[in-house]
Amino acid sequence: MIFDWALGFALGVFVTLFLIVVFDIRLSRGDRDPIRGAIARRLAMGPSVVAVGGGTGLSTLLKGIKAFTRNITAVVAVTDEGGSSGRLRTEWGVLPPGDVRNCIVALAENDNALKRILDFRFDRGELEGHSLGNLLLLAVTELCGDFSVAVEQMNHLLAIRGRVLPVTTEGITLVGQTRAGQQVRGELELSCHGRELQEIWLEPQDAHPLPDVISAVDEADIILLGPGSLFTSVIPNLLLPEFAAKVRDAQVPKVYISNLMTQPEETEGMNIVQHLDWVSAALGAVPDCIIVNSETIPDDIVASYAEQGADPLYLDRHQRELIQGMGCLCIEAPTALVTSSQDGKRILRHDPQKLAAIVVRLCRHLDVPDMFPAGERPSQVPGEGPEA
């Protein structure tokens, strides 16, 4: 075991040095390339975007946003307890690196090449199940002595378009109470009781966000909440009172991006309005805008997800009226994308480019309600008609 961990640590340091050399060469070449220089200047003039969440949803969003601006701050939840991140949190006392790693990869200039390296997962020995990226973050944390400093080093090291920040560096735990009065602790247990939850909070309740996270909100032109797991990626960030207050009081559009599907057990049986209600409760205010997918999801995808207990999230007339009554602008647009996983399985994700285009259009309008002319809607929910 000692040998395997020593090997992993040494490998992490070696990869760090290797990537420093590779990206230094890339950047020096880019400085001499007029086309790359022009792109860099355009991206530097883009809007300041703060994206809040974690997991696959946030990293997917970032892949699209980075094509329009490099002024991006991804604020990532640090309550993950599963897989490699959970093991490193337990054994090394480090904050879970998985979601941070995914967001850093998403913002990298060549995310596909970097993803293959950092997502490499060991399949034997004491390192079995760990990804190289997680071990690399662990190695840099050990060298720096602080997780937030390590993440900043990785931001600069990989020359990403923007930066990724953990919402806090304090050890926090998700706690919830069901309607039956049962208390559930930790992300894994809470995600199994999501549809039964009545209340959710963090322990300790006085955890503070990073100063850089607060500064990013102060400088933002738009704040995005989601997409991502409702109770375990989006809401945990908003349970830090100081951060929620800063976001709530920011005089810029606050946009909730709805998920495409419900999540088995965590949000099973919930509709879009119920998702929005939970986000509003955590934030202390209704977001200015919600983005909802209007594209028909293929039947085979729906059937595949239904076997796991997940259903498409569409709006109907009643939900639209409720959202309008909340004072929230509802943007319905085709944002779904069917892609393939590494094992060839067809999976559903947000389309990064389509989603980013909507966000950029929002940034260009000072008055959010004027973004679309009266009565205009990008598209209609499939199958809906006057009788709905």
Image (tube, rainbow, N blue to C red):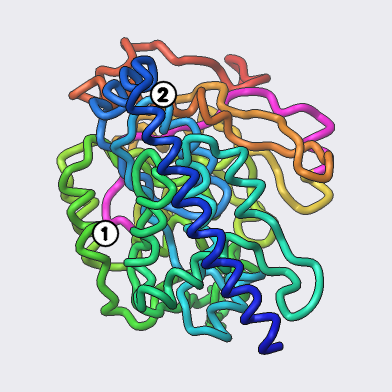
Percent position (x, y) of residue 43?
Answer: 31, 26
User: Picture quarter containing residue 37?
Assistant: top left
Ranked by sequence position, the earlier of labels 1 and 2 is 1
Residue at image coords 29%, 21%:
42
Percent position (x, y) of residue 10?
Answer: 58, 73
Query: Is 298 placed above or below 253 here?
Result: above
Q: Nearer the viewer, residue 101 or 374?
A: 101
* 342 sits left or right of 374 in the view: right
Contact (Cβ within 8 Å) of mark 1 with mark 2:
no
Q: Residues within 10 Å of mark 2 (few under 14, many from 20)?
A: some
Q: How many marks?
A: 2
Query: Is 12 placed above or below 347 here?
Result: below
Percent position (x, y) of residue 244?
Answer: 26, 59
Q: Which residue is mark 2?
A: 358
Identify the magenta region: 282-304
Q: Residues within 10 Å of mark 1 (few under 14, many from 20)?
A: many
Q: Which residue is mark 1?
A: 244
Q: Is residue 348 magenta?
A: no
Name the mark on residue 153: none
Q: Nearer the viewer, residue 136 or 249?
A: 136
User: Picture quarter containing residue 298?
Assistant: top right
Query: Is 283 placed above or below 187 here?
Result: above
